[in-house]
């Protein structure tokens, strides 16, 4: 393995090169770790928001009669989507003797291929199901949460949210960080070049008779 011989460099030059190499090699790692941590925290925040929305909707449905009141239910769903721009659509399911059937959706153009009825049948009454999906237009969160009448599960909400806001912030963060990193490297190279030129001139003057 080849090594860099710094025997001919002054102590100041060695220090400059050491700092430069340390920062140049470790800074990208810090960027990656920081971005990953932000993404994980943001996803956790979205899950908590979706759970809060499902509980708010659940609290507005006190019994099966209100669940079958499509007009009132539709108004509640539209208000929720209007107040939460990252919510794409919400599906509503009702529990029957044969399983869960969809009774209302805010986006009828979308036909879900996901087995919501099977998921709900296997969920305990006090738990929710969530999963992230990578779609052509970006990442999405899907959350399925039961609707309660007391302790009995009478239906469920299926909430789909877009993570576009996270992706935009990540892109902006990476762009700003990369620009800052590039500016730092350019400044460091300029400073180092000036330092080495001065050192070279000083050595030339000192070597003259």
Image (spheres, rainbow, N blue to C red):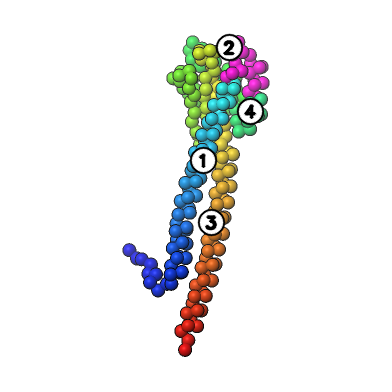
Residue situated in front as seen by the camera: 114 or 41 = 41
Other-residue count near label 2 (Cα within 10 Å), few / some / many at <14 / 14–19 / ≥20: some
| Stretch in magenta | 58-78
* Residue 21, percent from left and from top: 45, 61
Instruction: Identify which residue is drawn at 37% across, 69% down.
Output: 5
The tag earlier along the polypeptide, 1 or 4, is 1
Q: Position of residue 7 (x, y in %)?
A: 38, 72
**Residues tagged 2 and 1 counted as in contact (Cβ below 8 A):** no
Q: CA distance from mark 3 to mark 1?
A: 21 Å
Tell me the residue at 54%/34% (across/down): 45
Is residue 122 highlighted in magenta?
no
**Residue 181 bears which disc, if any?**
3
Crowdedness near tag 1: few (<14), some (14–19) or many (≥20) residues, C-alpha within 10 Å: some
**Crowding near pointer 3: few (<14 within 10 Å), some, many (20+)?**
some
Distance between the alpha carbons at the discs numbered 3 and 2 = 58 Å
Query: What kind of element bears circle 4?
Result: helix
| Along the viewing direction, whichever of 105 and 132 lies nearer the viewer | 132
Which mark sits nearer the N-terminus, 3 or 2? Answer: 2
The CA span between labels 1 and 4 is 23 Å
Q: Earlier in the sequence, mark 3 or mark 1?
A: 1
Say which residue label 2 marks.
Answer: 63
According to the picture, the residue beneath numbered tag 1 turns out to be 39
Q: Within 10 angstroms of label 4, few (less than 14), some, or many (20 or more) residues?
A: some
């Amino acid at each position: 393995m080849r090594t860099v011989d710094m025997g001919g460099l002054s102590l100041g030059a060695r220090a400059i090169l050491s700092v430069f190499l340390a920062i140049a090699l470790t800074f990208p790692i810090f960027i990656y770790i920081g971005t990953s941590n932000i993404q994980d925290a943001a996803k956790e925040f979205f899950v908590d928001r979706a759970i809060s929305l499902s509980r708010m909707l659940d609290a507005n449905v006190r019994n099966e009669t209100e669940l079958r009141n499509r007009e009132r239910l539709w108004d509640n769903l539209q208000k929720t989507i209007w107040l939460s721009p990252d919510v794409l659509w919400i599906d509503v399911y009702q529990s029957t003797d044969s399983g869960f059937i969809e009774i209302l959706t805010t986006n009828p153009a979308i036909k879900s291929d996901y087995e919501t009825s099977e998921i709900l049948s296997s969920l305990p009454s006090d738990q929710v199901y969530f999963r992230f999906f990578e779609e052509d237009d970006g990442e999405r969160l899907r959350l399925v949460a039961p609707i309660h009448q007391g302790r009995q599960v009478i239906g469920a909400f299926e909430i789909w949210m877009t993570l576009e806001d996270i992706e935009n912030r990540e892109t902006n963060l990476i762009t700003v960080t990369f620009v800052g990193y590039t500016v730092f490297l350019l400044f460091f190279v300029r400073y180092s070049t000036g330092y080495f030129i001065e050192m070279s001139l000083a050595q030339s003057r000192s070597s003259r008779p």
